[in-house]
Image (tube, rainbow, N blue to C red):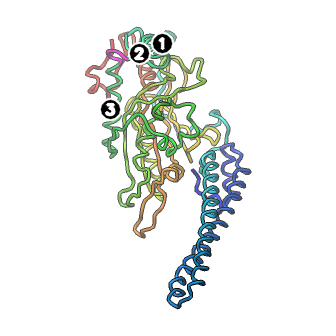
């Protein structure tokens, strides 16, 4: 969440920046300033009262030594009364702070100044494109038909076992999943990321820490009896490793990666966008996460973008990189770039990764801090990205590499697959 310091120091700038996300913050910011005024007034009165209690308490002993018992008793009574006052003041402070936090949880992160203006995905800016789009001809099959033809993925069996959006991978389909997972993890390790194997269920505090709660609870699977949530991405458990932690600046940036299953309800999804692997409730994904200093986080973001681009180049998939406009960015991101691959049979672009810098927004929720050489404690910056999500990568690989003889395996995956063609 936004820090109170940022809001109180320049409320007009906060309102202006949030307008780029098409979020009307003026009234909420005014309410926060009003509550903070009450909080600070209560704090000042509390400090004064505590100082008076301390001074009076010291005088009791002196009065008793001087034989002024009655006066000492009067002082004791006054101290007791002041202590009741401190309780009231503390309650006022706590209530104001609680109300401030409740409002802060509803306010999204401020976008960076270079984030493009715009309301929807149509306003995103294409920054770069790479690899050639194959010309497959009129008889090209979409991946769901290829999956059936080569017995790679059974969507109907998934419906029988679980429901729509839970496919069953078989034979070469399962091997392709495993090949991609191992390839992505090896590439992340070679780039200096420490592999983590986290839980795939998290508690409410973890959901609040990375911003999935209270914004996205409708999109998460909730185990109500235990009050646990199935993770929508490994970002949640991995970033929460650093919740309530003070790091040493010399250990930054921290670079973690993780393979997990991911779960998303995708409530309200329908139509052609959900065909085959286009939109699933459960899928495999490798996530890269960084914890960094404010001074270096933008460089970290560039390195993460280059890493994801390198994966797509090696997979020989046509791709494009989009800088998301303010209106299409996530609740928690300060800036975000999406990677899309071209699905040649569907003739459409499919999102396969989002790489985001959250500035101090998540770190403030997490209380993830670092201590520098000056011994001062500051909030970290957090970053993450998909490297990569498998379903749409698989969809594009199957469609783009189909031939009359079978489906070609990209060179980089042959050692993982143990074959160069699915026949």
Q: Position of residue 59 (x, y in %)?
A: 54, 84
The reply to whether dot 1 and dot 2 touch (C-beta < 8 Å) is yes
Q: Which of the marked residues, 1 or 2, is nearer the chain's N terminus? A: 1
Q: On the image, numbered disc 3 is attached to which residue?
A: 183
| Whether residue 53 is situated above or below residue 231 in the rendered picture | below
Q: Which residue is mark 1?
A: 140
Mark 3–mark 1 CB contact (< 8 Å): no
Q: Residue at x 32, y 44 (%)?
A: 194
Q: Secondary structure at mark 1?
A: loop
Rendered residue at 45%/57% (across/down)? 369
| Crowd around label 1: few <14 · some 14–19 · many ≥20 (10 Å) | some
- Label 2 neighbour load within 10 Å: few <14, some 14-19, many 20+: many
Is disc 2 placed on a helix, strand or loop? strand
Q: Secondary structure at mark 3?
A: helix
- The residue mark sitting in front, 2 or 3, is 3
The magenta-colored residue range is 169-173
What is the tally of numbered marks visible in this picture? 3
Quarter containing the C terminus: top left
> Which percent across, then down, holds residue 254?
38, 51
| Residue 79 sits in quarter | bottom right
Q: Position of residue 373 (x, y in %)?
A: 40, 68
**How far apart are the two marked residues, 3 and 1, measured between alpha carbons?**
27 Å
- Closer to the N terminus: mark 3 or mark 1? 1
Judge by depth and name the residue closer to the eye, 375 or 209. 209
In this picture, residue 271 sits left or right of residue 281: right
| Mark 2 vs mark 3, CA separation in Å | 21 Å
Neighbour tally class for label 3: few under 14, some 14-19, many 20 plus, Cα within 10 Å = some
Give coordinates of residue 185: x percent, y percent.
Answer: 33, 36
Q: Which residue is mark 2?
A: 402
**157 up-or-down from 349: above or below:** above
Of marks 2 and 3, which one's residue comes earlier in the chain?
A: 3
Q: Is residue 329 magenta?
A: no
């Amino acid at each position: 969440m936004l820090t109170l310091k940022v809001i109180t120091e320049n409320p007009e700038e906060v309102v202006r920046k949030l307008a780029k996300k098409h979020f009307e913050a003026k009234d909420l910011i005014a309410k926060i300033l009003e509550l903070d005024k009450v909080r600070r007034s209560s704090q000042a009165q509390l400090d004064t009262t505590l100082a008076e209690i301390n001074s009076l308490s010291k005088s009791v002993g002196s009065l008793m030594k001087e034989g002024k018992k009655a006066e000492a008793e009067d002082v004791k009574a006054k101290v007791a009364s002041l202590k009741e006052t401190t309780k009231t003041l503390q309650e006022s402070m706590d209530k104001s702070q609680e109300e401030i936090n409740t409002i802060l949880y509803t306010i999204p992160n401020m976008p960076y100044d270079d984030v493009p203006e715009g309301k929807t995905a149509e306003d995103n800016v294409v920054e770069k494109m790479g690899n050639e789009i194959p010309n497959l001809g009129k008889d090209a099959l979409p991946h769901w038909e290829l999956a059936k033809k080569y017995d790679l993925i059974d969507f109907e069996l998934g419906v029988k076992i679980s429901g729509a959006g839970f496919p069953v991978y078989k034979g070469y389909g399962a091997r392709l999943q495993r090949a991609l997972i191992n390839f992505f993890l090896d590439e992340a390790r070679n780039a200096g990321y420490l592999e983590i194997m986290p839980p795939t269920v998290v508690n409410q505090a973890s959901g609040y820490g990375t911003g999935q709660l209270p914004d996205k609870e409708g999109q998460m699977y909730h185990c109500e009896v235990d009050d646990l949530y199935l993770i929508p991405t490994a970002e949640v458990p991995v970033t929460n490793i650093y919740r309530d932690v003070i790091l040493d600046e010399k250990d930054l940036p921290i670079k973690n990666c993780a393979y997990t299953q991911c779960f998303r309800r995708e409530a309200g999804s329908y139509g052609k966008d959900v065909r085959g692997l286009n939109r699933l409730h459960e899928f495999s994904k490798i996530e890269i996460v960084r914890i960094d200093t404010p001074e270096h986080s933008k460089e970290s973001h560039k390195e993460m973008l280059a890493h994801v681009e390198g994966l797509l180049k090696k997979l020989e998939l046509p791709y494009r990189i989009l800088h998301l406009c303010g209106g299409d960015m996530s609740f928690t991101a300060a800036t975000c770039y999406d990677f899309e691959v071209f699905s040649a049979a569907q003739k459409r672009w499919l999102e396969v990764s989002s790489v985001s810098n959250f500035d101090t927004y998540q770190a403030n929720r997490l209380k993830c801090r670092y201590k520098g050489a000056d011994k001062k404690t500051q909030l970290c910056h957090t970053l993450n990205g998909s490297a990569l999500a498998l379903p749409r990568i698989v969809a594009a690989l199957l469609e783009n590499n189909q031939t009359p003889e079978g489906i070609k395996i990209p060179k980089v995956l042959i050692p993982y697959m143990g074959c160069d063609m699915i026949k």
